[in-house]
Amino acid sequence: MPSWRSFPLEVTSSILGWIAFSSWSVSFYPQILLNFQRKSVVGLNFDFALLNYLKQNLYLSYNASMTFSHTVQAQYRAKYGHNQMLPVAVNDVAFSIHAVLTTGFTGFQILIYDRGNQKVSKTCKALILITGLAAAICTFLAIPSNKWYWLVSSFNTIQVAMTVIKYIPQVVFNFQRKSTTGFSIGMVLLDLLGGICNMTQMILQSIDQRSYKNLFGNIGKSLLALVTIIFDGIFIFQHYVLYPAKAASSQVNVELPRDVEAAR
């Protein structure tokens, strides 16, 4: 296993990694607490919640495989060089496990709390079906040739696409309602901090190794941080600039506009 060249960079990277883990992990709880306090999930887009759960499972499969599978690790080094550090840290695995559990619990809240007239869209259901088929095809292609690193990398690529897609329903939903009520801004701010720390951690590792192969070797992690920063910026703009009055409203149950419901 290649080692760090610079001890200060190693320590800084480790600190940033655990800050990212803490921020991203804690970011799930403001929405969970908001749902609990209101006994309602109105305002939280169900497509966002469901796609996020699916995405976190794909991300866990990649991080766990890169960390615990010697076969996957060997195939990674065969592609990028035996002197390259693995692009997955312990905090990545810890985050993924926690993310699957907390997003799953949010899904449970959707089942038991007031949902208003919200429901999962047909588009979301189609996306889940397409994702499942894509994952199955990749698996069948990988089995005959034992291309396990290629398989988990495919899952990582899919989860990046899911990251982009999962945010869009909530962005559109906020725009349609002209409000961010029911959607936790605390979650967004913590998510943003995690994305910045995660991206910085990857850059520091590249500087230390004098190679940017780790950025491309785990392009999913790099793009995940970038996409997170972009969409969190959009949510912050919606909450504090576009709809500040309604964001501060104490309204509990915000229904979908009639024209939006009819479109569904």
Image (cartoon, rainbow, N blue to C red):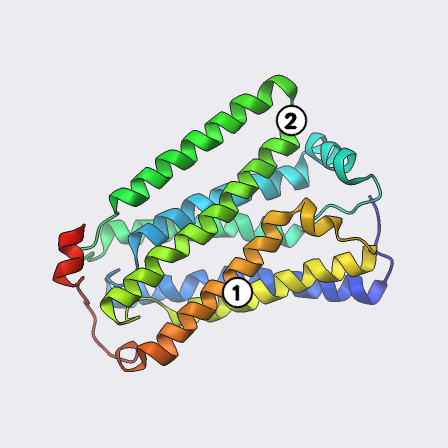
Q: Is residue 113 among the parts visible in the rendering?
A: yes
Residue plotted at (40% across, 69% down)? 235
Q: Which residue is mark 1?
A: 229
Query: At x 30% / y 57%, what residue is drawn?
Result: 45
**Residue annotated with mark 2:** 147
Residue visible at 59% across and 40% down in the picture: 62
Residue 194 against residue 110 in the figure, above or below = below
Near mark 2 (Cα within 10 A), the count class, few <14, some 14-19 or many ≥20, is some
Q: For this view, does 72 lie left or right of residue 228?
A: right
Residue 88 seen from this side = no
> Looking at the picture, which amino acid does disc 2 mark?
Lys
Q: Tag 1, which secondary structure? A: helix
Q: For this view, does 130 lie left or right of residue 96?
A: left
Badge 2 marks a residue whose secondary structure is: loop
Query: Against 151, is 28 above or below?
Result: below
- How packed mark 1 is, by other alpha carbons closer than 10 Å (few <14, some 14-19, many 20 or more), is many
Where residue 258 sits: x, y (%)? 12, 61
Quadrant where the image shows the N terminus: top right
Name the residue at 29% across, 44% down: 123
Work out which residue is located at the far right of the displayed protein and give it.
5
The x and y percentages for residue 221 are 60, 52
